[in-house]
Image: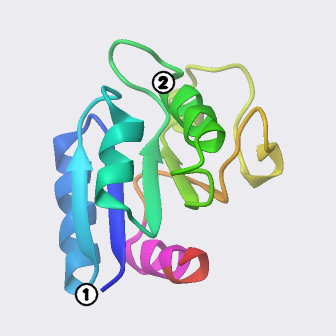
Amino acid sequence: MKKIYIIDDDKDIVESLTIVLSGQGYEVKAQYNEKDAVTNVTEFAPHLIILDVMFPEDDGAGFEMAREFHQHDSTREIPILMLSAVNAKGDYAGTFSNKDRDDSWLPVKEFVEKPINPRILIEKVKELI
């Protein structure tokens, strides 16, 4: 069974993603903050990380976690699907998209805006795993 780890502070989003992904046969685990993310991901050993950009304590925590995952041998090879509403909220100047992916600044495999259509979520997950 393929495993997916979700890191997002929005419990409703996590619950929705978990329902959709579990319904497709994935084992899903989640956390709602950035605390001990590398350790928790390493212990779960997922095939994919779904990561939010903004957290209440730090609007850029998702970017920082993506870079941290990329720096550790235990998590470096796990693809990251980054979900965010930053473009819709207008909290940042400009927007973020797949063209912004970069191994050092934004080491993610895919960048999509939320809310994400469940069908598109499944397509993206299948592409990345």
Q: Amino acid at mark 1?
A: Gly
User: Would residue 51 appear left or right of 113 to someone viewing this image?
Assistant: left
Q: Which mark is residue 13?
A: none
Badge 1: how crowded within 10 Å, few (<14), some, or many (20+)?
A: few
Tell me the residue at 62%/60% (across/down).
Answer: 77
User: Is 121 inside the magenta-drawn segment?
Assistant: yes
**Residue placed most toward the observer, 16 or 6:** 6
Element marked by disc 2:
helix
**Residue placed most toward the observer, 95 or 71:** 71
Disc 2 marks which residue?
61
User: Would residue 43 appear left or right of 75 to someone viewing this image?
Assistant: left
Disc 1 marks which residue?
25
Badge 2: how crowded within 10 Å, few (<14), some, or many (20+)?
A: some
Q: Main secondary structure of the magenta part?
A: helix
> What's the CA distance linking mark 1 and mark 2?
29 Å
Q: Amino acid at mark 2?
A: Ala
User: Is 93 inside the magenta-drawn segment?
Assistant: no
Task: Check the image and name the residue furthest to the top.
Answer: 57
Tell me the residue at 57%/26% (across/down).
Answer: 64
User: Would residue 19 appear left or right of 54 to someone viewing this image?
Assistant: left
Quadrant in which the N terminus is drawn: bottom left
Disc on the earlier residue, 1 or 2: 1
Element marked by disc 1:
loop
Q: Which residues are magenta?
A: 117-125
83 to 21, vertically: above or below: above
